[in-house]
């Protein structure tokens, strides 16, 4: 079941008062718990209604009204989209949320309609069309599943699949320059590469491979490997880890510096890997 979690506005949010560092820190920890539990599908804060507009429909006519809007307590200041097994589970997660506002705060929980709720009116043709749209959204190049941005200096990464049971993590790595991570090995997971755009060189063990769009390669666990984008233009590659292990935490940590992972053995060991050499030299 999916639930929209709606944070009601108050006079402070409508005045554009921003959360404190402490509130941002606590909310970040809460959102991280939601992600690790496989509950969070999306979430954003909303600017005051003074920055928005409303479009009123009357037959074929449209009337646009600029904000701000009255009835502050009926406005929305932010939202999450949860996926849980029941309404009760969604409620329990909301009860764990740190107070998102100064003073009193109210969060409303609303269940999202699913395809089966529409009955026979939602024909097989309409279902197929919606499924195609969902697939396109899920696989959109450069789109992060969580709506986040993570930089690695010469590239950015987008979380595409985060399995709730920790069995799989899939990233899309988009390069705007040449380069790649240092040589390393995984103690806990296999790593699979699938080139989408550009040219990549990957060394697994003592063998060197060149990957172009449509090519794939497996880097088995405990086998040293190193790879780099070597093409002159942009490059995109899917990287999958199974099981996920501590890889999501690793990427969240290293992208804080917006640079390729540092050659710090302790950093790699802390996330279930060993650093065994420098990056591939690229011209």
Image (spheres, rainbow, N blue to C red):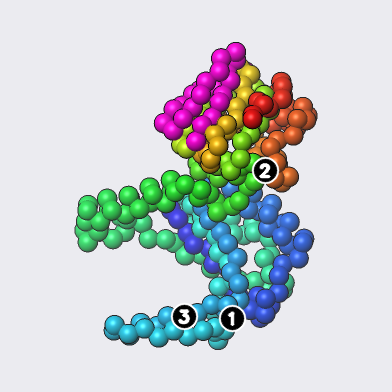
Q: With respect to residue 64, does 27 lie above or below? A: above
Structural crowding at the residue carrying mark 2, measured as other residues with C-alpha within 10 Å and reported as few (<14), some (14–19) or many (≥20): some
Task: First in sequence, mark 2 or 1: give its number.
Answer: 1
Residue 251 located left or right of residue 70: right
Q: Separation of disc 3 and disc 1 at Cα? A: 11 Å
Q: Residue at x 69, y 31 (%)?
A: 271
Which residue in the protein does label 1 denote? 50
Q: Position of residue 39 (x, y in %)?
A: 53, 49
Task: First in sequence, mark 2 or 3: give its number.
Answer: 3
Q: Which residues are magenta?
A: 198-222
Which residue in the protein does label 3 denote? 54
Q: Nearer the viewer, residue 275 or 163?
A: 275
Q: Nearer the viewer, residue 24 or 171?
A: 171
Membership of 205 in magenta stretch: yes
Which residue in the protein does label 2 denote? 153
Q: Separation of disc 2 and disc 1 at Cα? A: 36 Å
Structural crowding at the residue carrying mark 1, measured as other residues with C-alpha within 10 Å and reported as few (<14), some (14–19) or many (≥20): few
- The dot on residue 202 is none
* Snapshot quadrant of residue 95: bottom right
- Quarter occupied by the C terminus: top right
Which of label 2 and label 1 is nearer to you? 2
């Amino acid at each position: 079941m999916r639930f929209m979690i709606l944070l009601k506005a108050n006079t402070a949010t409508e005045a554009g008062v921003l959360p404190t560092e402490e509130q941002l820190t606590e909310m970040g920890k809460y959102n991280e718990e939601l992600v690790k539990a496989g509950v969070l599908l999306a979430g954003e804060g909303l600017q005051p209604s003074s920055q928005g507009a409303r479009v009123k429909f009357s037959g074929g006519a449209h009337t646009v009204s600029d904000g701000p809007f009255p009835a502050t307590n009926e406005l929305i200041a932010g939202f999450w989209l949860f996926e849980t097994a029941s309404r009760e589970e969604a409620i329990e997660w909301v009860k764990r949320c740190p107070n998102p506002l100064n003073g009193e705060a109210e969060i409303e929980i609303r269940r999202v309609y699913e395809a089966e709720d529409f009955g026979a009116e939602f024909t097989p043709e309409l279902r197929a069309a919606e499924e195609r749209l969902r697939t396109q959204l899920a696989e959109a190049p450069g789109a992060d599943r969580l709506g986040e941005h993570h930089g690695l200096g010469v590239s950015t990464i987008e979380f595409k699949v985060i399995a709730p049971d920790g069995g799989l993590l899939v990233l899309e790595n988009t390069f705007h320059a040449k380069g790649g991570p240092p040589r390393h090995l995984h103690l806990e997971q296999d790593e699979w590469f699938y080139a989408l755009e550009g040219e990549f060189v990957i060394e697994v063990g003592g063998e060197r491979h060149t990957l172009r769009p449509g090519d794939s390669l497996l880097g088995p666990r405990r086998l040293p490997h190193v790879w780099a984008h070597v093409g002159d233009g942009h490059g995109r590659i899917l990287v999958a880890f199974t099981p996920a292990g501590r890889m999501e935490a690793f990427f969240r940590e290293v992208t804080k510096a917006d640079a390729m992972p540092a050659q710090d053995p302790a950093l790699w060991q802390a996330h279930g890997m060993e650093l065994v050499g420098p990056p591939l030299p690229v011209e």
